[in-house]
Amino acid sequence: MPAQQQGPGPGTVSDVGEFGLIDRVTEAGGTSERVLIGPGDDAAHVRTADGTFVVSTDLLVEGRHFRRDWSTALEIGRKAAAANLSDVNAMGGVATALTVGLGVPADTPSAWVVELAKGFEQEAAVVGAHVVGGDMTASDVVVVAVTVMGDAPRPVRRSGALPGDVVAVAGRLGWSAAGLATLGRGFRSPKAVVDAHRVPTPPYWAGRAAADAGATAMIDVSDGLLADLGHVARASGVVVDLRTSALTIDVPLLTVGEALGLDPLSLVLTGGEDYALAATFSAPTVLPDGWTVVGEVRHVPEGAAPSVLVDGATWEGEPGWRHWR
């Protein structure tokens, strides 16, 4: 007889998907009066005896998130740090400390690991944070696990968007995806987008400014603007409608689109790893410098589900990155 399937539900992780899997795993977790914000946002918010802090963990795997033949150790360290510093930024906070878990093959040059550490410190220094500890072990490929901690006086969640709010973005969109497509075709130019894929430039100033301005919901764009705003829509129970006329398509994206036969708008809407921010604000709010309105929040029509629309219509195709395809 075939073995019976074990576990709380059917399907592989590919069938369930990243966030479905997270839901299943967290169902088994407990609660605590010290956990002010738990799973489901860019970072958790935890109370301590003398205050509070926000904390988040991220994982980067060689061949999945970076390639050593495409990026130097310094660049990989900076990218890994940026991905995590951005999570605190997306909560309206500023990171203060990181710990790093590192798995590397035995034949990895020690100088490569030192350069990786330098990359972490360089990127963390941009916001005044530091690496304060970690762990190392042997691994078949390079694996980097990062935990970031920081302060957020008014954490901004994904669940606060309200009908009538405006949707705004800060930072670049589509650049990293354009760089990935360029490298994937064996090219090294336009250099600007290749560099953006190797080392993103999150708008670290924008998260705290948005929180201070009263942002109702916020998220960083790690998997794609449509995919990540989808999390905001579902958490808030709303419809997000983007206006393509308000989105900026920079010249390097037009160049890559023409050279590789790609739709530059698709790069902007679905490309991840730029770590821009997307947020919602009440309509009368004067937005901080660097924030641009790109859409609005609406009620969910009767019988419909929360969603993200593009110019009032459903986007045809993948909204962004999926970990298991």
Image: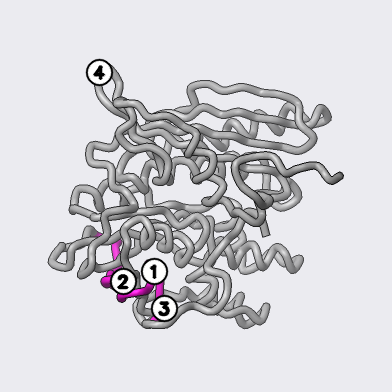
Establish if 262 lies above or below 104. below
Please report the bounds of the magenta region as a residue range. Answer: 289-311
Q: Residue furthest left?
A: 284
Counting residues from the start of the chain, the first of labels 2 and 4 encountered is: 4
Seen as rendered, the residue at the extreme top is 49
Nearer mark to the viewer, of 2 and 4: 2
Q: Whole-Å distance between the Cαs marked 1 and 2?
A: 6 Å
- The residue at 47%/53% (across/down) is 201
- Asked if disc 1 and disc 2 are in contact, CB closer than 8 Å, the reply is yes
Q: Where is residue 274 in the image (x, y as percent from the top left)?
A: 49, 57
Residue receiving disc 3: 310
Residue density around tag 3, few if under 14, some if 14–19, many if 20 or more, within 10 Å: some
- The residue nearer to you, when weighing 46 against 254, is 46
Q: Residues within 10 Å of mark 1 (few under 14, many from 20)?
A: few
| Residue drawn at 18 percent across, 63 percent down | 282
Q: So how many labels did they put on this image?
A: 4
Res 94 → quadrant: top left
**Which kind of residue does numbered mark 2 sit on?**
Val
Q: Earlier in the sequence, mark 4 or mark 1?
A: 4
In the rendered structure, does residue 217 fall within the stretch colored magenta? Answer: no
Among the 4 quarters of the image, the one containing residue 106: top right
SS for dot 4? loop
Position of 189 with respect to 254 (left or right) is right
C-beta proximity under 8 Å, tags 2 and 4: no
Can you identify the residue that label 2 sits on?
300
Q: Which numbered circle lies on residue 305?
A: 1
Residue identifier under label 4: 50
* Neighbourhood count class around disc 2 (C-alpha, 10 Å): few under 14, some 14–19, many 20 upward: some
Distance (Cα) linking label 2 and label 3: 15 Å
